[in-house]
Amino acid sequence: MNKVFKALSDPTRRKVLALLRERPMTAGELADHFEVSKPTMSAHFAVLREAGLVEPIKQGRVITYHLMMSVLEEAMFGFAQIFGLEVKAAEQPASTNDPKTDPKSGTTNSPKEQAQ
């Protein structure tokens, strides 16, 4: 859970997650939304991967990032439980972009399994 909250502590990484909430995007598409160097963007992607918040799928030279909403939800619920906060189940979102848990994706496989 600590890695998730470390990843969420940076506004750039939060914006990356917000963009991925809309749809999976390539590293280049994501980088176009920020005025930072390529190495800085790569470092942000590394922190998000380490936390399990994104899953990169490499196809040739292109890396497409997928939001792992289930990891974010698990961390948030865990945080709420630590402090005894009551958490009510939210309405089902339109899409989580998380093929592991999103019933609208039509599969329960990870993006890596889908790419094979």
Image: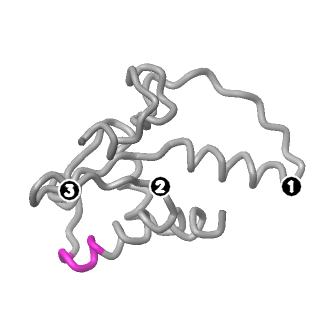
The residue sitting at 33% across, 41% down in the picture is 113
The mark nearer the N terminus, 1 or 3, is 3
Q: Tell me: residue 1, above or below residue 36.
A: above
Which image quarter: residue 42? bottom left
Crowd rating for badge 3 (residues with CA inside 10 Å; few <14, some 14–19, many 20+): some
**Structural distance between the alpha carbons of marks 3 and 2:** 15 Å
Q: Position of residue 75 (x, y in %)?
A: 66, 53
* The C terminus lies in quadrant: top left
Q: The residue under label 1 is which amino acid type? A: Phe
Q: Residue furthest front?
A: 116
Q: The residue under label 2 is which amino acid type? A: Leu
Task: Report the magenta residues as a range.
Answer: 37-42
**Structural distance between the alpha carbons of marks 1 and 3:** 38 Å
**Structural distance between the alpha carbons of marks 2 and 1:** 23 Å
To which residue does mark 2 refer?
53
Taking the image as shown, residue 44 lies to the left or right of residue 35, namely: right
* The N terminus lies in quadrant: bottom right
The mark nearer the N terminus, 3 or 2, is 2
Crowd rating for badge 2 (residues with CA inside 10 Å; few <14, some 14–19, many 20+): many
Q: Position of residue 95 (x, y in %)?
A: 43, 27
Q: Position of residue 106 (x, y in %)?
A: 39, 20
Residue 39 falls inside the magenta stretch: yes
To which residue does mark 3 refer?
63
Determine whether label 1 and label 3 are within 8 Å by CB: no
Q: How is the image coloured?
A: one colour
To which residue does mark 1 refer?
83
Taking the image as shown, residue 49 lies to the left or right of residue 58, namely: right
Taking the image as shown, residue 9 lies to the left or right of residue 77, namely: left
The mark nearer the N terminus, 2 or 1, is 2
**Secondary-structure class at tag 2:** loop
